[in-house]
Image (cartoon, rainbow, N blue to C red):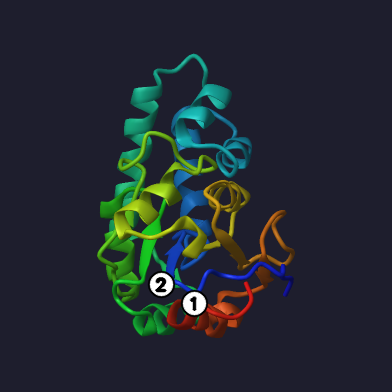
Amino acid sequence: MTSESNQPTGRRTHVLFDVDGTLIDALDNQRRVWRTWARRHGLDPDEVHRVALRTRPVETFAQVAPDRDPQECLAALHELEDEDVRSGVYTAFDGAAELLSRLPSASWALVTSNYEHRVRGRFARTGLPVPALIVDAAAVGEGKPSPAPYLSAAARLGADPRDCLVVEDAPSGVLSGLRAGMTVWGVNTPHAVEGVHRHYPTLREAVPDILAFASAGRGSR
């Protein structure tokens, strides 16, 4: 685990979670959806998935299928993703259920690049509790790594960004949280993503510290 010596303000704290890769293991599902999409468009599935891992869908289409209508591409992708929510196999990361069930109900939210109906479907499949606030792709004009998604969550919670903890697994999400002026902890990666204030190889290892942050708002970041 790595850390910085930043000190929280001692005011009311909130925890903002990414979803895929942070709370729910959806990597195989994402790979399967993108590869199916690629095959239907006569493209290299491995190359398409490689690009999709680091860009938003419309940016992926621009790179791998610049001659295709991006809205048609997006509609086909959404159809595949919705079907995967209905029929795919999802697993919550170890510690996710315990963590979310123990957090004060008004102290946390989800901030995702996916859409709310899919998040709710995945949470229903895995038995995870759903918070009152989900900031999804439709809620903001700019997605991660823009700070907009996390700043929107803080504003809707009535929270000072300095009192928010972001829990992420991906570089774009980490950068989004940092640009929003929040504390950012990384989970579920063997090595720390650049910029995180703390790194935990697994979500399970982060659970005690996340609960402490949420309940006390004191101690080191």
Number of numbered discs on residues: 2
Q: Amino acid at mark 1?
A: Gly
Frontmost residue, 165 versus 145: 165
The residue lying at 43 percent from left, 48 percent from top is: 151
Marker disc for residue 217:
1
Which residue is painted at 71% across and 70% down in the image?
5
Residue 101 at what x, y percent from top left?
35, 82
Residue 215 in the figure: left or right of residue 221: left
Say which of 146 and 26 sits in front: 146
Q: Is residue 113 visible?
A: no
Percent position of residue 54, x then y: 60, 41
**Looking at the image, is mark 1 or mark 2 earlier in the sequence?**
2
Spatial CA distance of label 1 from label 2 is 6 Å
Q: Which mark is residue 108?
A: none
Residue neighbourhood size for the residue with mark 2, other residues' Cα within 10 Å, grouped as few (<14), some (14–19), many (≥20)? some
Q: Element at badge 1?
A: loop
The residue wearing badge 2 is 12
